[in-house]
Image (spheres, rainbow, N blue to C red):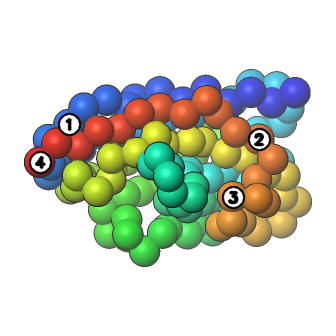
Amino acid sequence: QVQLVESGGGLVQAGGSLRLSCTTSGRTFRNYAMGWFRQVPGKEREFVAGISWSGGTIFYGDSVKGRFTISRDNAKNTVNLQMNSLKPEDTAVYYCAAHYAQSTRVAVMAYEYDLWGQGTQVTVSS
């Protein structure tokens, strides 16, 4: 069974940067597309970024384009989210997620992901 563990969250001032990491264990990491989502209380989980198993296909949510960068290292079973130019509205719990994909497909809807981490809090102060 694949387990996802996020790290790197914390408190940062607006304009600053944070780097989130998600380490996986269990099944073959290469067979999974990976994504990052975020959620604030009372709102639905929002797609932030997704990357195919090869890294060749990447999507970003509109609110983070140009500021966030997703990457993965299949040798280390890790996916990262570099977050720059952070804004107070980026404050949320960030979740790492995975879905099985034999192709280069990357899902953008939360319901398509069947594996989730426990989440890490990111707080951006103004």
Where does label 2 land, which residue?
A: 115
With 102 as the anchor, is 51 left or right in this view? Answer: left
Where does label 4 land, which residue?
A: 126
Where does label 3 land, which residue?
A: 110
Between disc 4 and disc 2, the foreground one is 4
With 92 as the anchor, is 47 left or right in this view? Answer: right
Quadrant where the N terminus is found in the figure = top right
Q: Tag 1 or tag 4, which sits nearer the N-term?
A: 1
Q: Amino acid at mark 2?
A: Leu
Residue at screen point 29% across, 38% down: 123
Contact (CB < 8 A) between labels 4 and 3?
no
Residue at screen point 56% across, 42% down: 95
* Local SS, label 2: strand
Q: Amino acid at mark 4?
A: Ser
Residue 105 percent location from the top left of the image: 76, 68
* Local SS, label 1: strand
Q: Nearer the viewer, residue 52 or 90?
A: 90
* Local SS, label 3: helix
Q: Amino acid at mark 1?
A: Val
* Local SS, label 4: loop
Q: CA distance from mark 3 to mark 1?
A: 26 Å
Q: Residue 12 has which mark?
A: 1
Check disc 3: other Cα within 10 Å, few if <14, some if 14-19, many if 20+.
some
Q: Residue furthest bottom?
A: 62
Q: Tag 3 or tag 4, which sits nearer the N-term?
A: 3
With 35 as the anchor, is 62 left or right in this view? Answer: left
Q: CA distance from mark 4 to mark 3?
A: 29 Å
Q: Tag 1 or tag 3, which sits nearer the N-term?
A: 1
Residue 87 percent location from the top left of the image: 22, 55
